[in-house]
Image: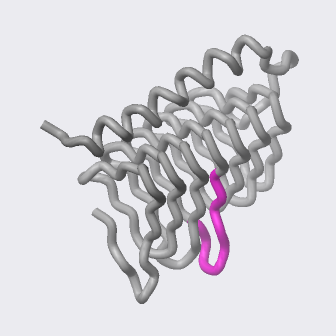
Amino acid sequence: MISTFEDRTPQIGPDAYVHPSADVLGHVRIGAGCWIGPGARIRGDYGQIEIGDHTAVEDNCVIHARPGEQTTIGRWVTLGHACIVHNATIHDWAIIGMGAIVSDWAIVGEWAVIGEGTVVRQRQEIPAGRIAVGTPAKLLEKPIADDFKTQWRGFKALYVDLAKRYRAGLT
């Protein structure tokens, strides 16, 4: 459900899809071509949330921000099933694995990968092109390779296509 809260109305970009069971509330801007999956909760009730173009917010994700602050999620980001992003910054092309938590004031760099179930602590920074796993998040030694980026560009495009197909009608 897309809801206004205290004169704060979500803005949904062209060609974006928000599943009927998702909640988008308050000061939220969702970019063009985004996929917002079933059960997602995007709460801009006392903070604000910016989601860039072509980003996938998969099933049961929670996105929130502290009062007067902002959660920023870049373009072509993948937020895996049931992850939590709270008052953080996620740069373009990043991948947040299923069940991961990215906590207050954390920064995830461009093309960084946060493994499934990983906890990125408050104020922790994950550099661009690096993989972080564990609780708390620790960097793996090897950065991601170009073939990984090629493969993930395809996966990310699947969600943009899925948004188009869902907009065409659920049956």
To which quarter of the image does residue 171 belong?
top left
Query: Residue at the spot x=25%, y=41% of the render?
Result: 168
The image shows residue 44 at horizontal and vertical percentages of 50, 71
Q: Is residue 143 magenta?
A: no
Is 2 positioned to the left or the right of 51 in the image?
A: left
Q: Is residue 67 magenta?
A: yes
Q: Residue at x 81, y 28 (%)?
A: 130
Q: Quadrant of residue 169?
A: top left
Q: Residue at x 54, y 30 (%)?
A: 156
Relative to residue 162, is residue 87 depicted above or below?
Answer: below
Q: 4 or 17: which is nearer to us?
A: 17
- The one nearer the camera, 60 or 158, is 158
Residue located farthest toward the top when viewing the structure as drawn: 147
Total marks shown come to 0
Q: Is residue 14 left or right of residue 133?
A: left
Tell me the magenta residue range.
Answer: 65-73
**Image quarter hosting the N terminus:** bottom left
- In the image, 115 versus 150, the foreground residue is 150
Position of residue 123 in the picture relative to residue 65 (left or right): right
Q: Residue furthest bottom?
A: 7
Residue 126 lies, with reference to residue 146, above or below; the image says: below
Where residue 135 sits: x, y (%)? Answer: 67, 34
On the image, the x and y values in percent for residue 123 come to 79, 55
Q: Residue at point 54% right, 43% down?
A: 54
Position above or below: 2 against 62: below
Instruction: Choose top left, top right, bottom left or bottom right for residue 76.
Output: top right
**Colour scheme shown:** one colour
